[in-house]
Amino acid sequence: MIEGQCLCGEVKFRFDGTPEYIAECNCGACRRYATLWAYGDHDTIEIEHGEMVVYFRNDKMLGFYSCAKCGCTTHWDGAEPGYRGRRAVNMRLAEPEDIKDIRIRHFDGRDTWTYLD
């Protein structure tokens, strides 16, 4: 299990198990949020939170959630039918030693929608 939290501690997550890889995406949102995503669903990723802010991009496919208190982007939840039930958590909020051995894959969410490795 990997645990993490936002800067102020209002939002905490638990990832059940160890992800096969962590994704660094270069789409406009992920690049600006500087996230490292571990993918799962509501069964593998548990979120405990206080007040949150959610942002839906134009395509409304994903809702990006951030702590309303400190502003850290914590996770996304799928919103469109093909993504409902899917979730990803920002592993930059985990302790570095807990994720140091997990492979980082680079995802081209900007142009080709494929992994670059």
Image (tube, rainbow, N blue to C red):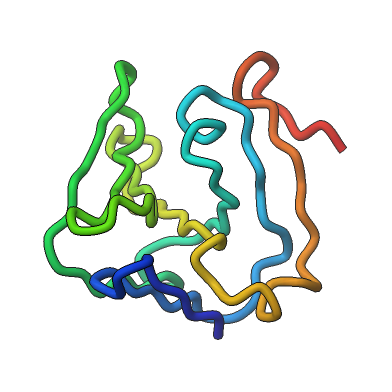
How many discs mark residues in the rendered view? 0
Q: Position of residue 66 (x, y in %)?
A: 29, 50
Residue at 19% x, 58% y: name it. Answer: 69
Q: Quadrant of residue 10?
A: bottom left
Task: Determine which quarter of the picture holds residue 84.
Answer: top left
Q: Which of 14 and 44 lies nearest the eye of the viewer?
A: 14
Tell me the residue at 28%/26% (across/down).
60
Task: Provide residue 74's location: percent of width, then percent of height.
Answer: 38, 56
The relative height of residue 111 versus residue 60 in the rendered view (above or below) is above
Task: Please provide percent x and percent y for residue 58.
Answer: 30, 16
Farthest residue, direction bottom: 1
User: If the image is split into quadrants, where does the C terminus sit?
Assistant: top right
Side (left or right) of 30 relative to 10: right
- Residue ranking furthest to the right: 117
The reply, left or right, for residue 45 in relation to residue 24 is left
- Where residue 78 appears, as percent x and y from the top left, is 34, 43
* Residue beneath the point at 25% across and 56% down: 67
Furthest residue toward left? 51
Side of 75 where 101 appears, left or right:
right
Query: From the viewer's perspective, is 40 left or right of 105?
Result: left
The front one of 12 and 20 is 12
Which quadrant of the rendered structure holds the N terminus?
bottom right
Q: Residue at horizontal 33%, vertical 19%?
A: 59
